[in-house]
Amino acid sequence: MGASITNLRNLDCQFLRSGKCPFRWVEKLSFMFFQTQACCMCFRNNLLWIVFGTTFTVGAGLIIAVLADRSRFENAAKAMIFLPMAISFVGAGVIWNFVYAVRPVSAPQIGLLNAITVGLFGGQPQAWTAFFQPWNNFFLIVVEIWLQTGFAMVLFSAAIKGIPVEIMEAAQVDGANEVQVFFRIMLPQILGTIITVSTTIVIFTLKILMWSGS
């Protein structure tokens, strides 16, 4: 409560009482959000992480949940996909630091991605996470997808198992194929879970960006 009052007071002093013009705060907000290069870059990075990170994490979790439920090795497959959730941020950073590691051209490459690039394709080693903006964000978003796909998969798998078998069988009797069952039966039935998982991953993504910014 005290923090909220302090923030409202600061907002009033900075924007609502700054100058004779009553709309001076609009100018300040416009300068802050649209005319500051660092702020524009921050908004762009947030948008990239939220859109691509959430979309690919939810999509990968849903696809793996559907495929794993039809596999004989369901438990083993889900355990392997869920395993990164048990790894801390520090551990994930160490693991992916080895994946993206870069060394001089004359030295042997210890990074997995550069070893593949140099050894199999004859290319030059690249500092993947130091690429020019905004492409380096995508290599970091991969880490988030790797961490959160297991979480999405578990929730989607539980939601799919909760779909009444009678509905699925009735659709198959009526001649619906697997694709039609997925889009017309499964997705509407688990829409609430999709929204919940997407919201949770968006919040997780914003926390990552907040920690990295601080």
Image (tube, rainbow, N blue to C red):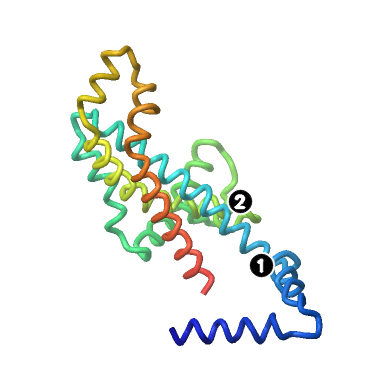
Q: Quadrant of the N terminus?
A: bottom left
Which one is nearer the viewer's eye here, 16 or 118?
A: 16
Element assignment for label 1:
helix
Question: Which numbered dot is residue 29?
Answer: none
Q: Residue at x 50, y 64 (%)?
A: 209
Q: Earlier in the sequence, mark 2 or mark 1?
A: 1
Residue highlighted by disc 1: 39
Q: Residue at x 34, y 62 (%)?
A: 91
Q: Quadrant of residue 201?
A: bottom left
Relative to residue 137, is residue 205 drawn left or right? left
Which one is nearer the viewer's eye here, 167 or 79?
A: 167
Relative to residue 163, is residue 95 drawn left or right? right
Element assignment for label 2:
helix
Eyeballing the image, is 164 above or below 57?
Answer: above
Q: In this rendering, does residue 106 appear at all?
A: no
Image location of residue 114, percent across then percent down:
51, 47
Amino acid found under the numbered disc labelled 1: Cys
Question: Which numbered dot is residue 135?
Answer: 2
Local crowd size for mark 2, using a 10 Å CA cut-off: few (<14), some (14–19), many (≥20): few
Q: Quadrant of residue 73?
A: top left
